[in-house]
Amino acid sequence: MLKDRLRHIIENKGFSQEEAADLLGITQGALNHYLTGRRKIKTDFINDFCQKMNVSIAEIYEDTPQKHDSDLNVDVIKEIYVTLEGWLSKNNYELEPMDKINLVFALYDRVIKVPKENRAIEIIDIADVIMKSRKVG
C-alpha cells in the first residue's frame, strides 16, 4: 500500500516521523494521518514528498520485495504495457524504451491485485501522477 511505501522510505532515509514532517513542512500529526491511512494521499503530497525526500515517483509505487520472473503474470504485464502505450500516445508523452519498461514494472505491483475490470483506470491514474511529476521536476 502507498502509505506503507511512504513509511518504508522515511525509515530507510533514517528520519523519525517528526524529522520527516519538518522536512515536508507539515505537522507530525498530519504525517501520521497519511501513514496510517486516516488522510487520503493526494498527488500534490506525493510530488512534494518525492522532491523533498529525493526519491523518484517510481520508487513510491514499486513494491519493496522483488519478484522472481516466474512469479510475474505475463498477461497483466501485457495489459499494463498496452494500456500505458495507448495512454502515453493519446497524451503526447514520449518515453525512452527503458523508461517505459521501468514504468510497466513500477505499475505491476500496484495493479496486480486490482480487479481486471478496474485495472485500466488504476494504470492510467498512476501513470498520470508519475508523468505529471516528471514535468514538475
Image (spheres, rainbow, N blue to C red):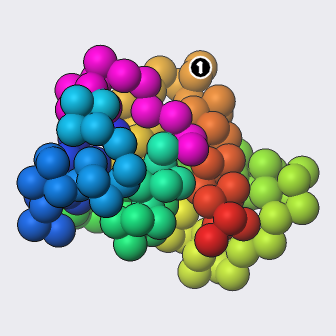
x and y percent of residue 107 in the render? 48, 51
Left or right of 87? Residue 120 is: left
Left or right of 10? Residue 57 is: right
**6 or 26, which lies in front?**
26
x and y percent of residue 50 in the render? 43, 61
Q: Is residue 64 above or below residue 124?
A: below
Which residues fall within the magenta stretch? 32-44
User: Can I make out residue 85 in this image?
Assistant: yes
At label 1, which amino acid type do we have?
Answer: Glu
Quarter of the picture holding the C terminus? bottom right
The quadrant in which residue 135 appears is bottom right
Residue at 17% across, 68% down = 13
The quadrant in which residue 101 appears is bottom right
Residue at 34% across, 66% down = 53
Q: Is residue 30 above or below residue 25?
A: above
Residue at 52% across, 34% down = 42
User: Can I make out residue 104 in this image?
Assistant: no
Q: Is residue 1 above or below residue 56?
A: above
x and y percent of residue 22 in the render? 27, 53
Near mark 1 (Cα within 10 A), the count class, few <14, some 14-19 or many ≥20, is few
x and y percent of residue 69 in the render? 28, 64
Residue at 53% across, 54% down = 47
**96 or 71, which lies in front?**
96
Confirm whether the magenta stretch covers residue 33. Answer: yes
Disc 1: which residue:
117
